[in-house]
Image: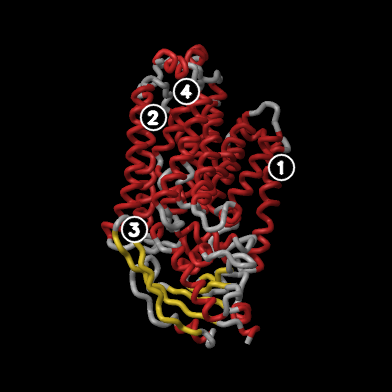
C-alpha cells in the first residue's frame, strides 16, 4: 500500500499538482466564508445593488465587478459570490502559472505560484468580491498575453487579441488598472529589443480592442458628468496635506504595506530554494537543461527581464511617482502587482527547488495559520468587540421585517419596488428580500440620484419605497435617529416614519441586537 502510494506521488506531474492545488484553494476559500459568514461583505452587497441595473458605469467604479456579481447572484444565497471571488483568483493563478513555466523549471514554477498564497490579497482579502478582485485575473492574463506576444517570433495575433480583451475588462473593473498597459507601452518605446513590435499590427490591434470595450463607459461617464472619475479623484486626494513630509510619509506607508504583504511569499520561496545564487559562469544553457529551466540566450534574458520589470515594477513606480506628487496611495492599489512580482523574484534570484519537503511543511503551516486567522476574525471578532461586523449582520432578518411591514401597510400583493436610504441596510434589504413578482427592488443609494443614476426623486415618489437608515456607517449596534435626515423628509413629505426595527440575533453563542430606522413612502401613482 505504501509502495503504491509512493509510486502515485512520484508519477504526479507539476501540471497535475497545480490543478490539485487550484481546486483545493477554491474549495477551501469558498467553504470557509460560506460556513462562518452570515452575510455578504460590504463591497459585494454594494456591487449587487449596482449590478441589478446593468449600467455602463457606477459612481464608484466602472461596471465589471457589478456585472459579474449580478451574473453569479443565485437568489439570496451567499456562497456563489464567495465562489466568484475564488474563480477570479484561480484564473489569475493559471495565468501566473503559464508565465512562470516559460522561465522556470516546471516544479519551481509550481512553487512560485503556490507561494502566492503568502500574499494576503489572494486569500483573506479576496473573500470580499469587489473591483480589486476583478483586477487579478485581468492583470495576470494581460501580463501573460503581453509576455507571450512580444516574445513570439511569429507575432501571433492571438496573444495581442487576448491582451486587448483582458486590458479592456481590466480598465472596466478599476481605473488603477491603467498603470499596467501604460507601463507596457513605455517599455515598448524605451527598450530597443521591444521597439520593433510597433511595426506589426499586434499592439495596434490590442489597443483598438481595449479602447472599443472602454468607449461605452466613457460615453456614459461624459453624459453623467464623470461621476466615477470624480470619485477616484476624491479618493486620491491626500487627507494629510501636500507637504513634502506628508508625501514622503504616504509613500513610505504604501511601501511598508506592500513589503508586509510580500514577506510571507518571500519566506515560502526561501523555504523551497534558499538564497544560494548562481556562481559566476554557472548560468549556462547546459545548467538550464539540467534543471529543467527553458534555454534562453543572454539577449533573451535581458529582454525578458525588461518585460517582467514592465509588468511588475513598472506599475509600482507609477504609484510611487503619484504619491510623490501628492496623490494619496491606498494599500490595495498594490494588490495585483505580486501576480507578476512573485515569479519575477524566483527568476531574479535564480531559484531552484532544493528543499521540496521544507516547502511543503512551510506551505502547510502557513495555510493552517490563514485558516485559524480567518476563524479568529469570523468567530472571535464579534465576541471580543461586543458588536457585529458586516459579515455577521442580520441582513436576511432585516429584509423579512421590512417586507412584512411594507405588505401590512400597502397590501399583501403590492410589490416593493425601491429600497432607499443608507447604502448598507438598503443593499441588504434588496439582496435578501423574500422573492416577489417582478424581481428584487432597486436601491436608491443614500437617496442620492448622483449615486443611483437609474432613479430620481420623481420616480421614487411615483413608485413608492421603503427608506432605511443607520446611526452611522459601520456602527450596526448603535441606535439610529428616530427620524431620517431632514433632507429626506423635505424631499419626500409623504414619508411615514415607523418605530425603529430591533432585530435580535444569536451569533456563536452570544446574543446581539441591531436597530435600524425605517419609513414607508406610499406610491403616489396609486393614491
**Disc 3, SS:** strand
**Residue 195 position within the rendered picture, expressed as x and y whole percent measured from the top left:** 64, 35
Residue 93 higher or lower than 246, as above or below: above
Residue 60 vs residue 360: left or right? right
Quadrant of the snapshot with the N terminus: top left
Which residue is disc 2 drawn over?
269
Dot in front, 4 or 2: 4
Mark 4 burial class by Cα count in 10 Å: few <14, some 14-19, many 20+:
many
- Cα separation, mark 4 vs mark 3, equals 44 Å
* Label whose residue precedes the other's in the sequence (2 or 3): 2
Badge 1 vs badge 3, beta-carbon distance below 8 Å = no
- Cα separation, mark 1 vs mark 4, equals 35 Å
**Residue 290 position within the rendered picture, expressed as x and y whole percent measured from the top left:** 48, 13
Badge 4 vs badge 3, beta-carbon distance below 8 Å = no
Say which quarter of the image contains residue 514: bottom left
Which residue is disc 3 drawn over?
507
**Disc 1, SS:** helix
Query: Camera-side residue: 514 or 491?
Result: 514
Badge 4 vs badge 2, beta-carbon distance below 8 Å = no
Dot in front, 2 or 1: 2
- Cα separation, mark 2 vs mark 3, equals 39 Å
* Label whose residue precedes the other's in the sequence (2 or 1): 1
Residue 107: assigned label: 4
- Cα separation, mark 2 vs mark 1, equals 37 Å
Mark 1 burial class by Cα count in 10 Å: few <14, some 14-19, many 20+:
some
**Residue 296 position within the rendered picture, expressed as x and y whole percent measured from the top left:** 55, 20
Which residue is disc 1 drawn over?
205
Residue 415 vs residue 125: left or right? right
Instruction: Say if residue 172 shows up in the picture.
Output: no
Amino acid at each position: 500500500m505504501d509502495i503504491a502510494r509512493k509510486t502515485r506521488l512520484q508519477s504526479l506531474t507539476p501540471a497535475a499538482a497545480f490543478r490539485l492545488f487550484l481546486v483545493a484553494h477554491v474549495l477551501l476559500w469558498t467553504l470557509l466564508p460560506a460556513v462562518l459568514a452570515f452575510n455578504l461583505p460590504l463591497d459585494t452587497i454594494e456591487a449587487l445593488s449596482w449590478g441589478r441595473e446593468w449600467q455602463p458605469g457606477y459612481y464608484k467604479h466602472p461596471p465589471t465587478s457589478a456585472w459579474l456579481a449580478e451574473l453569479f447572484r443565485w437568489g439570496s444565497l451567499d456562497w456563489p459570490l464567495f465562489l466568484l471571488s475564488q474563480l477570479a483568483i484561480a484564473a489569475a493563478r493559471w495565468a501566473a502559472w503559464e508565465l512562470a513555466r516559460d522561465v522556470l523549471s516546471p516544479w519551481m514554477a509550481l512553487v512560485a505560484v503556490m507561494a502566492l498564497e503568502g500574499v494576503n490579497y489572494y486569500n483573506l482579502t479576496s473573500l470580499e468580491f469587489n473591483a480589486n478582485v476583478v483586477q487579478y485575473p485581468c492583470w495576470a492574463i494581460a501580463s501573460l498575453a503581453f509576455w507571450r506576444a512580444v516574445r513570439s517570433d511569429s507575432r501571433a495575433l492571438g496573444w495581442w487579441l487576448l491582451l486587448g480583451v483582458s486590458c479592456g475588462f481590466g480598465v472596466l473593473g478599476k481605473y488603477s488598472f491603467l498603470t499596467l498597459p501604460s507601463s507596457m507601452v513605455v517599455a515598448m518605446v524605451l527598450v530597443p529589443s521591444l521597439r520593433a513590435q510597433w511595426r506589426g499590427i499586434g499592439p495596434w490591434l490590442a489597443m483598438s480592442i481595449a479602447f472599443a470595450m472602454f468607449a461605452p463607459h466613457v460615453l456614459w461617464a461624459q453624459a453623467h458628468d464623470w461621476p466615477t472619475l470624480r470619485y477616484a479623484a476624491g479618493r486620491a486626494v491626500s487627507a494629510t496635506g501636500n507637504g513634502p513630509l506628508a508625501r514622503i510619509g504616504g509613500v513610505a506607508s504604501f511601501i511598508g504595506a506592500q513589503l508586509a504583504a510580500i514577506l510571507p511569499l518571500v519566506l515560502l520561496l526561501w523555504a523551497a530554494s534558499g538564497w544560494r545564487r548562481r556562481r559566476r559562469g554557472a548560468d549556462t544553457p547546459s545548467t538550464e537543461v539540467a534543471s529543467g529551466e527553458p534555454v534562453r540566450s543572454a539577449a533573451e534574458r535581458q529582454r525578458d527581464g525588461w518585460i517582467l520589470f514592465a509588468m511588475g515594477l513598472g506599475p509600482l513606480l507609477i504609484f510611487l511617482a503619484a504619491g510623490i506628487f501628492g496623490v494619496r496611495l491606498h494599500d490595495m492599489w498594490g494588490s495585483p502587482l505580486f501576480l507578476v512580482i512573485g515569479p519575477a523574484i524566483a527568476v531574479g534570484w535564480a531559484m531552484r527547488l532544493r528543499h521540496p519537503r521544507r516547502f511543503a511543511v512551510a506551505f502547510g503551516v502557513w495555510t493552517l495559520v490563514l485558516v485559524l486567522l480567518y476563524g479568529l476574525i469570523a468567530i472571535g471578532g464579534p465576541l471580543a468587540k461586543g458588536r457585529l461586523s458586516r459579515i455577521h449582520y442580520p441582513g436576511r432578518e432585516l429584509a423579512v421585517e421590512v417586507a412584512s411591514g411594507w405588505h401590512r401597510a400597502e397590501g399583501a400583493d403590492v410589490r416593493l419596488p425601491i429600497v432607499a436610504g443608507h447604502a448598507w441596510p438598503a443593499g441588504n434589504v434588496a439582496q435578501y428580500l423574500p422573492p416577489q413578482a417582478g424581481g428584487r427592488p432597486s436601491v436608491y443609494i443614500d437617496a442620492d440620484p448622483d449615486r443611483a443614476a437609474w432613479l430620481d426623486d420623481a420616480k421614487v415618489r411615483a413608485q413608492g419605497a421603503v427608506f432605511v437608515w443607520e446611526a452611522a456607517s459601520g456602527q450596526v449596534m448603535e441606535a439610529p435617529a428616530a427620524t431620517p435626515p431632514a433632507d429626506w423628509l423635505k424631499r419626500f413629505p409623504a414619508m411615514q416614519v415607523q418605530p425603529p426595527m430591533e432585530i435580535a440575533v444569536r451569533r456563536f453563542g452570544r446574543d446581539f441586537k441591531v436597530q435600524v430606522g425605517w419609513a414607508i413612502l406610499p406610491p403616489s401613482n396609486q393614491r
